[in-house]
Amino acid sequence: MTGAPEPISEAGRAALEQDLAGLRAERAEVAATLRGDGEAGDAADQADELRRADEVDRLDDRIAVIEGRLREAAVAGEPSTGTVGVGSTVTLRFSDADEMTVRIGELAEELDPELVTADSPLGQVLLGRRAGETVEYDAPGGRTTALVLSIGAP
């Protein structure tokens, strides 16, 4: 990522919101099983209580990360058309003269052949680039070179 607040696609936002709702429901279920009354119980009960408390902490951490990402996306605005960022649509020309338009996304979305995640090899080399720049990256077929032809918003 570029370090600045990054936009997120509508599909990405919906996926995060769905994940968040599931995590909140799971947290509520686990938290409801915590006694919190200070009763000691036997060692097995204490271990189980600690495990559930750790699970609530883990869920709280994940919820905080997703809420933070959604807040960041809300203030990020539209993707820049000057440099490649999450949410940008990028047209590339490869060394074999083939052209392809891809969309830089944060989350892999099912059945979207035009999506390139920001943490993929191509996504990583594209972030922060401008039209006219050449990028080189490791593809499954070997080292590949591509020219950034244009950058647009979704």
Image: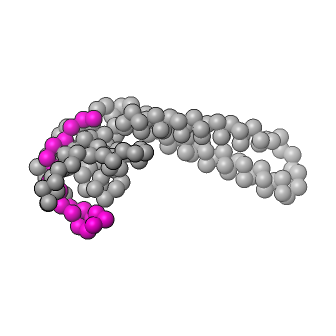
Residue visible at 84% across and 57% down in the picture: 44
Q: Residue at x 23, y 45 (%)?
A: 101
Q: What residue is rendered at 50% in x and 34% in y?
A: 17
Q: Is residue 96 left or right of residue 119?
A: left
Which of the 4 image quadrants contains residue 145?
bottom left
Position of 81 with respect to 69 (left or right) is left
Residue 69 at x, y percent in the picture: 44, 39
**Could you tell whether 143 is left or right of 112 in the image?**
left
Name of the residue lying farthest toward the bottom: 142
Q: Position of residue 56 (x, y in %)?
A: 66, 45
Residue 138, x across and y down, in percent: 27, 65
Residue found 86% across the figure and 50% down from its top:
40
Does the image show residue 18? yes
Name which quarter of the figure residue 27 lies in.
top right
Main SS of the magenta part reads: strand
User: Between residues 62 and 135, which one lies in front from this camera angle?
Assistant: 135
Q: How is the image coloured?
A: one colour
The vertical placement of 121 against 115, above or below, is: below
User: x, y percentage for residue 111?
Assistant: 40, 45
Quarter of the image for the C terminus: give it. Answer: top left
**Considering depth in this image, is 100 or 29 the residue closer to the camera?**
100
Question: Between 86 and 154, which is closer to the camera in this rendering?
Answer: 154
The magenta span reads 136-154
Q: Does the magenta segment cover residue 43?
A: no
How many badges with numbers are in the image? 0
Asked if residue 85 can be seen in this view, the reply is: no
